[in-house]
Image (cartoon, rainbow, N blue to C red):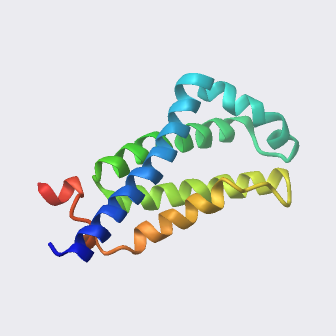
Amino acid sequence: MDFITEYRSLAILLLRIFIGWLFFVQGFDAAFRIGIRNAIQSYSFEFMKKGIPLWMLYVLGYLLFVSQLVGGILLIAGIYKFLAALVLCLNLLIASIGFSLVNPVPDLKHIYPRFLLLVVLLLIPPDWDPYLFSNWL
């Protein structure tokens, strides 16, 4: 590999690890430190005032936290990068819709940068990312 290709490959690897780590830590924190049930209950009153049933909060809450945890691990490892990034984009879309229901102008300062980083990751051709674990199989 020439210098430019190697530099680009390392930059993509760092991007993938960075965004994967952000999601992994958020999912890990919610699942094992705060607790998924506690995290959901902290928002449940506001959502239930808007007519969202509690069962839906639990289903979506567990799906969002599991997708953050697993999606983060997959991005870091470089396994199913495209699928993991798409699932995490969907995760952010659901979260932003949910928070918009509670507050018409929600503070999405953590959602927008992650979404943009995921979109960049999705636009990168697979052959530019030689450090994907799936490429080594």
Residue 131 sits in which quadrant?
bottom left
Q: Position of residue 2 (x, y in %)?
A: 17, 75
Up-down relation of residue 94 to residue 39 (above or below): below
**75 or 55: nearer the viewer:** 75
**111 or 15: nearer the viewer:** 15
Q: Position of residue 6 (x, y in %)?
A: 23, 68
Residue lying at 13% horizontally and 56% vertically, measured from the top left: 136
Up-down relation of residue 126 to residue 108 (above or below): below
Up-down relation of residue 13 to residue 34 (above or below): below
The answer to whether 115 appears left or right of 8 in the picture is right
In this figure, what is the number of numbered marks? 0
**124 or 62: nearer the viewer:** 124
Q: Position of residue 126 (x, y in %)?
A: 27, 70
Residue lying at 49% horizontally and 69% vertically, measured from the top left: 119
Residue positioned most to the front: 3
Residue lying at 67% horizontally and 41% vertically, measured from the top left: 56
Looking at the rendered image, the quarter that the C terminus falls into is bottom left
The answer to whether 24 appears left or right of 133 in the picture is right
Q: Is residue 29 visible?
A: yes
Q: Is residue 127 visible?
A: no
**93 or 136: nearer the viewer:** 136
The answer to whether 96 appears left or right of 71 in the picture is right
Looking at the rendered image, the quarter that the N terminus falls into is bottom left
Residue lying at 26% horizontally and 72% vertically, measured from the top left: 128
Residue 130 sits in which quadrant?
bottom left
Q: Position of residue 16 (x, y in %)?
A: 39, 57
